[in-house]
Image (spheres, rainbow, N blue to C red):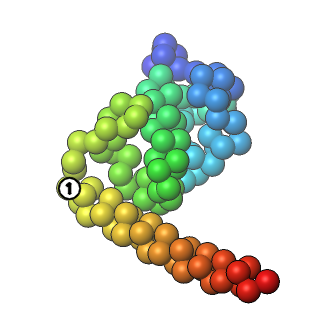
Amino acid sequence: MDGAGQMLIGELSRRTGVSPRLLRYYEQQGLLVARRGPNGYREYDDDSVVTVRQVRALLNAGLSTEVIRQVLPCARGEQPGFDWCADLRAIMDRELAAMDERIDDLQRTRGTLAGYLAQS
C-alpha cells in the first residue's frame, strides 16, 4: 500500500477527540484495527474515524466493549445505524433486559436510602 488514506495515531486522536491511550485500548479490545508501518508506528485507515465514533456512540449507549465487538460489524454510519445481522437483535435485547434489571435494582436501592432519610 502506498500510504494514501493512512494516518498515525495522533491524527486519529485529533480527528476523533479520543486520546491515543484510549485508541490503543480499543485496539487491544479488538474494536479498532491498526497496521504497523515500516517504522513500527500504528497506521489507521480513514474508515477508522467512523469506527471510533461508532465505538463512542455504543459506549454512550451503555454497551460493554465485549458487546460492541459483537455488534460493530453490523454498525453503519457514525450514529450508528445497523444492518440487522444474525443474532444482533438477540444481543441488543439481552443488553436492554440487563439494563432494565440494573435500573430496577437501583430504584430499589434508592427507595431504601430515601426511606432512611425520611426517618431522620
Quadrant where the C terminus sits is bottom right
> In front: 69, or 45?
69
Up-down: is 111 above or below 70? below
Q: Which residue is mark 1?
A: 86
Label 1: element kind? loop
> In front: 56, or 31?
56
Question: Does residue 3 appear in the picture of this structure?
Answer: yes
> In front: 26, or 80?
80
Horizontal arrangement in the rendering, residue 85 relative to residue 32 (left or right)? left
Horizontal arrangement in the rendering, residue 4 relative to residue 109 (left or right)? left
Up-down: is 46 above or below 76? above
Rendered residue at 33%/59% (across/down): 92
> In front: 8, or 80?
80
Question: Does residue 37 appear in the picture of this structure?
Answer: no
Near mark 1 (Cα within 10 A), the count class, few <14, some 14-19 or many ≥20, is few
- Residue 67 location in percent, x, y? 43, 59
Rendered residue at 41%/31% (across/down): 78
Horizontal arrangement in the rendering, residue 50 relative to residue 23 (left or right)? left
Up-down: is 78 above or below 120? above
- Residue 91 location in percent, x, y? 32, 62
- Residue 51 location in percent, x, y? 46, 35
Tell me the amino acid under the disc marked 1.
Answer: Ala
